[in-house]
Amino acid sequence: MDTGGAARRVALGTVVLGLAAFVLIAASRVPWEPVPGGMPTPARASSVSTFSEIERAEHYARWARTWSWSSLAVSLAVACWLGFSSRGRAWAERVPGWWWVRITVVVAGLTVVGRLVTLPFAIALRRLALDEGLAAGSWSDWAVDVVKGELVAVVTTSLAVIAFVGCVRRLPRAWPAVAGVVAAALVVLGSFVYPVLVEPVFNHFESLPDGPLRTEVLALADREGVAVDDVLVADASRRTTTLNAYVSGFGHTRRVVLYDNLVDGTPRDEVLSVVAHELAHAKHGDVVTGTALGAAGALVGVGLLGLLMAADGRRDLRRAGTVPCLLALVAIATLATAPVQNGISRRLEARADETALEQTNDPQAFVALQRRLALRSHADPTPPAWSQFWFGSHPTVLQRIGMARAADVRE
């Protein structure tokens, strides 16, 4: 029986199934018109910030994009060189040990190389953040966080690749479907356990202390119909001066987290505006939506990989020598699909903003918050359109303030 032909047919079926699931989930759960009547006209930059504030934000954003995009270009070039050249394959093949040990070593080696070639850009970006007053902590603290991040990347990537190669080795005909399902399951599992396994590696969390703010936060959650057992405060101020909050996990691992510098130095009505936004994500199940879309995308990705590898008979997915190629393809796919991911993210964020405005009934606090966040992070009020399209995960600050002002007029 033609093993390659069978695997190719299964891969094609996996792609079709994954695309169908993605379209169905996106159509039913993504708010394609998050603001009734469409997004309002963005606010004018001059009505939100002074000339000097705009100039400073644009200066920071220009250099931040320079270092970030340079890092991305170099890392992608190195990944492709190692992944598609004979040198990367030959090095990976020389690694000794059991097949799963070899994969772990290759993943670790590629991760270290990727970090080393982009380290100058990371240092330049941190130096810029320090100069602009956006970063805190010592260089040694920063280095420890970098090492922690790389270790987490090695562990998670190794587990995923080992599971993938294990499917190929055991099921030479059906592996695209089985590996696709395994990849989707790993996306769901990762989203579920991330708050309790990974987040504590980088931050210490404490419950928001009893007091008026906690009482108002829990009352706001009750009005939005969101069950919240606790609200956590992260010690983010030890590494950054920017303000933030987020919701992560789902089910029993769902948590609403506020940065400590947001709680300590921000007016209460603005903090409640942030909390209302994050609670809206929980109310609408946005983490579940993102996880489901990621799982469907994993099915598509594994299926496409099966089709690519079937067309290239020179590479054997059962061997460690193919791991550099596999990771290079993942890097390319991640960059190529960024507009889809971020386009969906912007709509989810816009709906959360709209819900927060409805629940707090305080557009002025929302505007003051967005201005505060923008000033503290030196957010570019008018990023290049193509950059916002490709990399922007949130509406711009001017779009968000435009939403709030439109809501104020409606009232």
Image (spheres, rainbow, N blue to C red):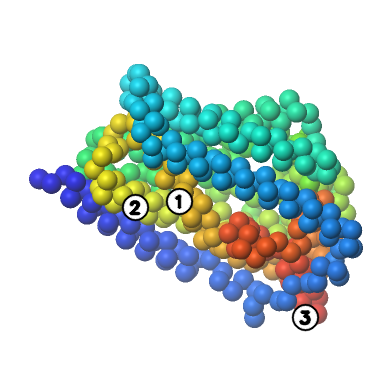
First in sequence, mark 2 or 1: give its number. 2
Task: Name the image quarter holding residue 71.
Answer: top right
Q: Position of residue 238 (x, y in %)?
A: 78, 34
Is the residue 232 above or below the residue 362 in the image? above
Q: Position of residue 186 (x, y in %)?
A: 43, 42
Say which mark, if any, is on residue 333.
1
**Image quadrant containing the C terminus:** bottom right
* Residue at the spot of label 3: 410
First in sequence, mark 2 or 3: give its number. 2
Say which mark, if any, is on residue 304.
2
- Foreground label between 1 and 3: 1
Give the total of numbered labels. Answer: 3
Say whether marks 2 and 1 touch (CB < 8 Å).
yes
Q: Residue at x 79, y 32 (%)?
A: 137
Q: Dot 3: what SS? A: helix
First in sequence, mark 1 or 3: give its number. 1
Name the kind of residue labelled 1 in the image: Ala
Q: Dot 2: what SS? A: helix
Name the kind of residue labelled 2 in the image: Leu
Left-right relation of 131 to 5:
right
Is the residue 397 above or below the residue 119 in the image? below
- Foreground label between 2 and 3: 2
Name the kind of residue labelled 3 in the image: Arg
